[in-house]
Amino acid sequence: MLALDLLLTAGQASQPTEQDPYLQRFFLSPGAGGIAVFLAAAIAGFVAWRNANKTSTDAQAKAADERVKATAEQNFARARAGEERERVRQEQFWARLTWIYERATAQRPEARLSSVVTLALLDALGAEADTELEVTAIENLIIGLTVDRTGGGAEE
């Protein structure tokens, strides 16, 4: 009912007269409609720009997160590969040290390594030692083998 009254009142006032105030005549003119359309288009354009900008920012943030995640995964894979290489290196080191020890202390004389060969092999293996435990193991083995072969005291 109120809307009908407004339409009837607007219809009666749509014919501006010289006695109407300026703003009332302007709002009833076609120029006011043009300004209203322009303002509506500007608001719609601003909203569209904000949404596009937000979408772009969200996409950039998502891409940055994916890059960080990929970098973290690569770093983790490299660390795992490094750990695996170190594990294999240590296994090989201890297998070679055990082989040298077993050949240096073999019961059968024909299977036993000579002192010179044993010390050369231990020296070469010592150059590959990375940990303090590995270095200490080689040093102690050299001392132990030197004592065993000389019959008591270490050679100088």
Image (cartoon, helix red, strand yellow):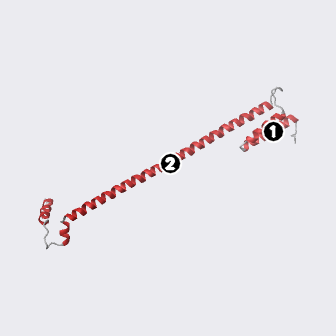
In the visual, does 46 lie left or right of 139? left
Q: Position of residue 29 (x, y in %)?
A: 18, 65
- Residue at left offset 46%, top offset 49%: 63
The residue at which mark 2 appears reads as 67
Identify the image quadrant of residue 139.
top right
Identify the image quadrant of residue 51.
bottom left
The answer to which of 81 and 41 lies nearer the viewer is 41
Callout in the foreground (2, 1): 2
Q: Amino acid at mark 2?
A: Arg
Q: Amino acid at mark 1?
A: Ile
Would you place residue 31 above or below residue 136 in this image?
below
Image label count: 2
Q: Position of residue 74 (x, y in %)?
A: 55, 44
The residue at which mark 1 appears reads as 142
The answer to which of 143 and 83 lies nearer the viewer is 83
Which residue is farthest bottom?
19
Q: Position of residue 19 (x, y in %)?
A: 13, 74
Label 2 or label 1, whichever comes before in sequence order: 2
Pointer 1: residues within 10 angstroms few (<14), some, or many (20+)?
some
Q: Quadrant of the N terminus?
A: bottom left
The answer to which of 37 and 76 lies nearer the viewer is 37
Provide the secondary structure element on which disc 2 rests.
helix
In the visual, does 11 lie left or right of 83? left
